[in-house]
Image (cartoon, rainbow, N blue to C red):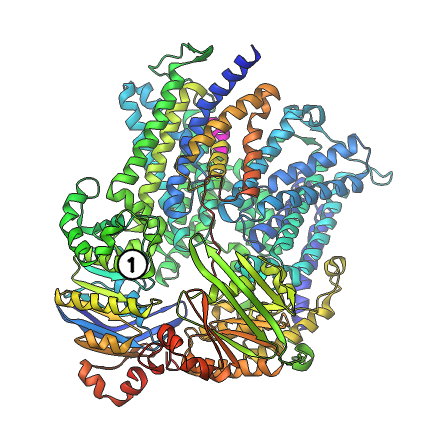
Amino acid sequence: MESIIIAQMAVSGAFMGLVYALIAYGFQLTYATSKSINFGQGELVMVSAFFSLTLITVGLPYWLVVPGGLFFGAILGLFVERAGVRLALEQKSEGWILLTIIIGLFGFSAAENIWGRDDRPFPTPISSDSIQVFGVSITPLEISVAIGVLAVMGLIELFKRKTLLGKAFEAVSADRDAAELMGVSATRTIMLSYGLSGMVAAMAGILVSPITTVGPTMASALILKAFSVAVVAGLDSGFGVVLIGLFLGALESLASFYIGSGWREAPGLILLILALAVRPNGVFGKASIRKV
Amino acid sequence: MWKRLLLIRGSELVALALLASIPLAVDNSYVLGLLTLLAIYGILLIGLDVTVGYLGQVNLAQAAFLGLGAYAAGLSVSLLGFGIFGALGVSLLVGLVLGGLLAFPALRLEGPQFALATLSFSALTVTALNEWESLTGGAQGLHVNRPDFFGLDVNAQGFYWLCLILLALVWMAMRNLLSSQWGRAFEALRDSPIATDAMGVGTFRHKVAGFALGSALGGLAGGLYAFNFEYLQPQTYVYDLMVILLLGVVLGGRKSLWGAFVGASLIALLPNLLSNWLLFEVISALGLTVALAAGVRGLMKKTAKPFQAIAPIIAMGLLVAGGFMVENTENWRKAIFALMLFAVVVGLPEGLMGFASRFLARLFRIAPPALPAPAGLNTVLTAKAADGKALLELRNLKRYFGGVKAVDGVSMTVRAGHVHGLIGPNGSGKSTAVNVISGLYAPTAGEVLLHGKTLPQGSLFKVARVGVSRTFQNLQLFGELTALDNVMVALKGVYRSPLPLVLLGLAQGEEKRAQAESLALLELVGLKDQARKQARDLTYGAQRFLEIARALARKPDLLILDEPAAGLAHPDVNNLVEIIKRIHQRGITIVLIEHHMDVVSELCDAVTVLDGGQVIAEGTPDEVKRDPKVIEAYLGVVSEAEAPGAIPSPA
Amino acid sequence: MLVVENLHAGYGTSEVLVGTSLEVKQGTVVALIGANGAGKTTTMRAISGMLKPTKGRVLLDGKPVQGQDASRIARLGLAHAPEGRKVFGPLSVEDNLLLGAYSRLPLFFGFRSKAAHELERVYDLFPRLRERRQQAAGTLSGGEQQMLAIGRALMAKPKVMLLDEPSMGLAPVIVQEVFNTIRRLKEAGITLLLVEQFAKSALEVADYAYVMERGCIAVEGSPAELHKNERVLAAYLG
């Protein structure tokens, strides 16, 4: 019996872990082109989720809400790049860390006041009645999360590997100056990566909302774990985030079961600090050579 | 000299006296509360400024240290029955120890990774405070009783004076510390960690020390915070507070005690600003005016990019307009902070004090204190025995990067007192070889011996400590430090005072000696007259020479010069040759990597030629120049004059 | 085709170029020679937009392009094979070449077929690259990387090509090969501005040459004229 419970906890945790992986993947997208990430990504997830909820409330069908939410997320991503990142990158400073935090804080406050401080349910056509697989119950909702996460990541990876624009992403990340000389505008590539990253965050928001409900603080715990996943896997590791996401999701679910639900954030945070101490470039990341 | 001291110390004393006497003049508990908070935030922000300003890292953990310090103080009173000073000592210690512990993993990180590590630590702290209910009372909160002071009950006024005295002490100690070798090392670390290590200063211990120090002040402020409010809740120390603290540091101005103080007063006043609508509108209108004036001025003078000028105007405009549209500004607290912080970070990155100090310096024309006379060169660089014994030996040295064999079995001997040239085509392994010798890379195989003893491997710091000093092909100066400070950072054998003396400001004597010795080295490279200039404002040639002076400050047995003439104009190349000759005369052994064959011919006693990571020739400059292998691989088939840089380049 | 007038540029406070002027006529190879630090590479960078000139004009096909972003200038028909080759290490040889044609290919689909013809031409010019088309560019030897950098610049079908120190750090044998390639480019009618340390070899392929000293042009003329100039002969041609 014990083992069934453990399996159940691990499996439900792992589904959440996929959401962390998706958000972490959003960090990788921008890190690849610009070595920067949006520290306010959690707020972006949350605001996009609220926006999608509004679309539903207005009466839009679900299949229109998803593209609407994604589009909104992309716009927010572009805004973050323009307002918070571009200037700092031009000055080669780390001001973007502070600026993206600030923009996130503004988003949080705006959401609190526009949509209220309460958590609200997010209706979805997908059923949450569980089915039994080897004694472990899984809901179609959870499966939809898995499909959604993997589909989005797969599509973007396909785009990066198979289109010329995707190759331009890699070129900018390999050598920004040389890419410019080929006619690839680094600024636009970075913009695009932030747009995509915003879209990915919105997707995460739409996928996770039916499970967690929508509220201003819905993403504050989520984002810390996404940071953990991104750093532990390595900010340039591609699909490494999926493995680490699954692992961390299962781990925290078990931790909250055995130590207490308040401690569920702890494993991710400890893992992050440890990973940074032992392998600063992540488990799957590439080691860099110091040059002078 | 006296005028300067009078102005600077005088203004500090006047401010202190004013602050201390306010409660005597105004009997108002509300004002007193504000002042107390100001003193506490002052200590907190001075601590935060060590990491954010001096170490240049985005630190998101200071709010957590405030919380940890607060709980530590509260619990040591309620559980251990400590007095007020005992409790504050515990707060300080908790900050120091946990800060040190966090610094270890965070040590190797920079930029976003460091910020993430500190962010995780903050989140972990709040989780722990919330969940460890048996100790902290969890979300219920913890009541703290302010202990008495040797039997005397401490009233609000007395507590305020205590906070103020502590702020003054912290201020004094930090001023002494930051103007000492420690402060210079912190800044050096920010500008170039690699050079800091290579100058034997040790990024490791300074980063840990700086972070632990800042955290300890956070802890101390936390202790005071606990005794001020007498009620603690984990929720107080989260994200928002941290953003507000950063707002304080950035708005006040980084790397400035006054900046931290100004920032502290602003964030202490902020909540009141929001509760009064009229005041809020007046202040945001004021902000908008400043943003407009600064933006227009920046655009006209072309000192600001359009975004830098316009974005703060939009942010402040939103603030003014928002005040009219929103019913309760209190609800939009975070958004208001965000807009203000955004405008400041983008439009006024140097902060209020950074702006004001330039203005004040012009107004009062404060001359910096006079420099001492340079020390005699003989006392700074004692002559070494140039006895021609083997000083540096490489034995079958190898360094591979993946499949690339950058250095593939190099053996060579550098004799004491020689100038030993190391030449070869691009990519032949010269730079990798000296990077292995100086400890930047660990060798894949082989040995490096100095004075017959194995050199430490893979640590710039340790190699620098045993007497090897180097310059860098791509300059690694501490750009924001002056030329003099660049040399002083590296200076060996002068700084001996223990930390307590430094904190008390009793290490002035050695500071003078360090200046005198450093000036002697600057004189040697012809930069004595530019000692006060920031390194980044020096001409390219002067920067190259400054690196040499800085490397000499290590008083090395072996000096490695990595392409010192690269990019130098013709007259500077001649100066360089003269400088190297002067260094040579002092018996210092030199390894010289250089492309200018005539420089090599003129200076070197022996030359080793590398190609493809291996030694292809060795001998005197004339011998290697005639060597057919060298002509083929490096000098070129045409003739000597065809070799790259054969002409003393008239750039 | 390419005209540079009174160009000033520098890094931070130090000015490297102080009024460089030169011209590259269509279908010619022009060499830019000079000592280390004379400003040759800076000239190239200021022309292609990697460095913003502080003063002066750059005309590409008669149109001023100075001050524009490097990516925009590249799209207007200038290909710059930079010093140090700068191939995209993690990407395959073929991807490197395709990116060379970035400005004239569709961004999503069908770019491969559209680039096929040009790709074949480059592979014919450098058969070694065809052999290694799927290999990561970073694993090529220095000489092969240089071929790739030239091939990548050719993929853009540029109006003008800038070639900065193609022989840098290469073994003498490979250097010969590089110069043979440049000769073939010349025969194919490519307009080329070449910066070289090996001045003598550069003059052998060039139609016209400029000698740079201290950030501006000191001497100019046809190779034959420069060979008659005693100072140039002594200082650069041995």
Left or right relative to C200: residue A259: right
Above-or-below relation of B578 to B391: below
Q: Which residue appears at 62% of the width and 34% of the height?
A: B125
Mark 1 surroundings: few (<14), some (14-19) or many (≥20) residues within 10 A? some
Q: Is residue B183 visible?
A: yes
Q: Is residue B270 visible?
A: no
**Quadrant of the rendered structure where residue C185 is?**
bottom left
Q: How many marks?
A: 1
Q: Nearer the viewer, residue B270 or C231?
A: C231
Q: Which residue appears at 19% of the width and 39% of the height?
A: C109
Left or right relative to B417: residue A182: left
Q: Amino acid at mark 1?
A: Glu
Main SS type for the magenta part?
Answer: helix
Q: In this figure, which residue is indicated by the disc labeled 1?
A: C144
**Quadrant of the rendered structure where residue A147 is?**
top left
**Quadrant of the rendered structure where residue C201 is?**
bottom left
Asked whether B611 falls inside the magenta stretch, the response is no
x, y (%) of residue A245? Answer: 46, 30
x, y (%) of residue B369? Answer: 64, 72
Above-or-below relation of B276 to A168: above
Q: Nearer the viewer, residue A73 or C118?
A: C118
x, y (%) of residue B594? Answer: 45, 74
Tell me the element at label 1: helix
Q: Which residue appears at 59% of the width and 50% of the height?
A: B51
Name of the residue lying farthest toward the bottom: C230
Q: Nearer the viewer, residue C130 or B627?
A: B627
Q: What residue span does the magenta drawing correspond to?
A: A216-224
